[in-house]
């Protein structure tokens, strides 16, 4: 199957996106695609001070030359993030122009702002990515900070994506490295989805699984090419990021692309973590979460759970009230003290449920262990690839101490309803052992 056939096959599962074109110079097709998708509408280009000179001005001129009514809004701040104030800013553009369709020219933040605001006005939009930095261009949902909390708002992906590889390959190398890390997160994320499927809480959806996981290793296979900015390697990376979004469209959820790896990033966002005065990129934060989960899986897969004492585990399993009390203690000084309580309540299972979940693990352990090993990269392999592309390889690279990272682990286990490896470890009474193997003497993140 050639590249174009693969793209068309992947596009067929997308529920929102109708056009995905990727290649050299495809930004020039923006007026044609816009007119086909949004006949009779005005184009409202949203860019920032960095993406306007890179691509926005060109696209604006091409729309004007094509006779399409066009306006623009350029965000002037050097540093801005996907926060509610900016959603309101974009909302105001659409409030003033009932006939306007947003044209997002930028990276993940501008895309998410345009995605959510378009949805809030009952419209779709066109996106022209300027970097292979995130998988959010094609994803269902927008990640926005609202009232201090990083939240995923349900909203459709764009109708059309035009990925000009000439522009994307010329993006700052750190942005491409962040995108590589975001795509690599799907490796341990996939294994955690396998656990949720085994537990019966979030069954694997084959269409959403195969469109990404079947090609994931290939999309990550050329870190040297990514580091060198080779267009063919960047195109492969962007293709993988786009398929990740298509998988989320098909699932109507972030489940195919996000689990504990992303929760480390959400914690840092919600605590407004900065390093050298700067907020850290989503992909760089996710890189540390991904490495940590690879390390946890390495330790987990060394264990033999075929002799697991299920009766003892079930007898020791805490009540919902006890878990809620633990969550309140962990989140006592957090920006939202009740976050852990809400989420653990959603995913709590009683003793009989836990007994059945652990029975499934114990009875199929040799086979399960091999499946997980085939899915998850070893820590050393993931760290080596991150080093090549220029992504963080140690928490210190984003200003996080190993002690701080260890202290984040209880939050990540509790802060979302989604079943993860740490939930399995809690049920099997191996949680403390896992944490010690990763953060204790001789561990990869030894404190």
Image: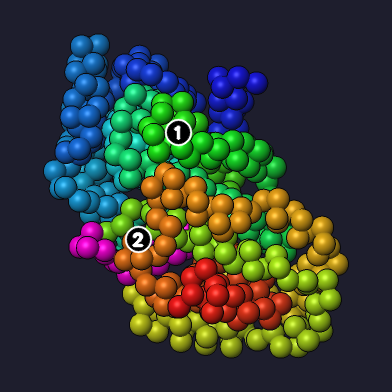
The vertical placement of 290 against 55, above or below, is below
Magenta stretch? 260-278
Quadrant location, the N terminus: top right
Instruction: Name the residue carrying label 2.
Output: 397
Please report the residue visible at 18 percent of the width from the left and 29 percent of the height from the top. 53
Asked whether the viewer can see residue 46, the reply is yes
Q: Residues within 10 Å of mark 2 (few under 14, many from 20)?
A: some
Q: Position of residue 2 (x, y in %)?
A: 60, 19
Instruction: Name the residue carrying label 1.
Output: 225
Please report the residue visible at 55 percent of the width from the left and 19 percent of the height from the top. 4
| Nearer to the camera, 435 or 383 | 383
Taking the view exactly as shown, the residue that stands out farthest to the top is 66
Asked whether the viewer can see residue 189, the reply is no
- Numbered disc 2: secondary structure: helix
What is the spatial separation of the Cα atoms under label 2 and label 1, in whole angstroms? 22 Å
- Numbered disc 1: secondary structure: helix
Q: Position of residue 228 (x, y in %)?
A: 39, 34
Q: For this view, does 107 lie left or right of residue 364?
A: left
Taking the view exactly as shown, the residue that stands out farthest to the left is 76
| Nearer to the camera, 101 or 266 | 266
Quadrant location, the C terminus: bottom left
Please report the residue visible at 57 percent of the width from the left and 79 percent of the height from the top. 436
């Amino acid at each position: 199957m050639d590249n174009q056939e693969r793209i068309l096959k992947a596009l067929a599962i997308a529920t929102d996106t109708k056009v995905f074109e990727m290649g050299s110079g495809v930004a020039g097709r923006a007026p044609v695609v816009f007119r086909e998708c949004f006949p009779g509408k005005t184009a409202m280009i949203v860019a920032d001070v960095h993406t306007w000179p890179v691509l926005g001005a060109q696209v604006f001129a091409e729309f004007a030359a094509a006779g399409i009514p066009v306006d623009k809004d350029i965000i002037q701040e050097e540093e801005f993030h996907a926060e509610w104030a900016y959603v309101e800013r974009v909302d105001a553009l659409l409030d003033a122009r009932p006939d306007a369709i947003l044209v997002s020219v930028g990276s993940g933040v501008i895309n998410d702002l345009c995605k959510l605001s378009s949805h809030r006005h009952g419209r779709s939009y066109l996106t022209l990515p300027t970097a292979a930095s995130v998988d959010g261009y094609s994803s269902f949902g927008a990640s926005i900070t609202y009232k201090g909390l990083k939240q995923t708002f349900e909203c459709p992906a764009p109708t059309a994506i035009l990925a000009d590889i000439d522009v994307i390959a010329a993006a700052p190398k750190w942005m491409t490295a962040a995108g590589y890390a975001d795509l690599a997160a799907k490796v341990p994320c996939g294994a955690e989805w396998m656990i949720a499927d085994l537990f019966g809480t979030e069954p694997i959806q084959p269409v959403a699984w195969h469109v990404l996981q079947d090609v994931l290793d290939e999309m990550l296979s050329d870190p040297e090419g990514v580091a060198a900015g080779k267009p063919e390697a960047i195109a492969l990376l962007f293709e993988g990021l786009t398929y990740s979004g298509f998988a989320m469209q098909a699932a109507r959820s972030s489940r195919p692309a996000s689990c504990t790896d992303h929760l480390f990033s959400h914690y840092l966002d919600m605590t407004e973590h900065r390093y050298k005065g700067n907020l850290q990129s989503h992909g760089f934060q996710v890189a540390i979460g991904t490495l940590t989960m690879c390390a946890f899986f390495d330790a987990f897969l060394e264990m033999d759970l075929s002799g697991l004492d299920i009766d003892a585990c079930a007898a020791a399993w805490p009540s919902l009230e006890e878990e809620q009390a633990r969550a309140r203690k962990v989140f006592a000084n957090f920006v939202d003290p009740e976050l852990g309580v809400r989420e653990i309540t959603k995913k709590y299972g009683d003793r009989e449920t836990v007994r059945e979940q652990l029975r499934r693990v114990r009875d199929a352990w040799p086979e399960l262990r091999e499946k997980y090993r085939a899915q998850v990269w070893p820590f050393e392999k993931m760290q080596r690839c991150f080093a090549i592309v220029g992504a963080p390889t140690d928490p210190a690279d984003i200003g996080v101490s190993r002690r701080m990272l260890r202290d984040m682990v209880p939050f990540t286990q509790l802060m979302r309803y989604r079943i993860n490896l740490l939930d399995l470890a809690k049920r099997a009474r191996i949680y403390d052992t896992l944490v010690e193997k990763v953060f204790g003497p001789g561990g990869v993140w030894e404190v």
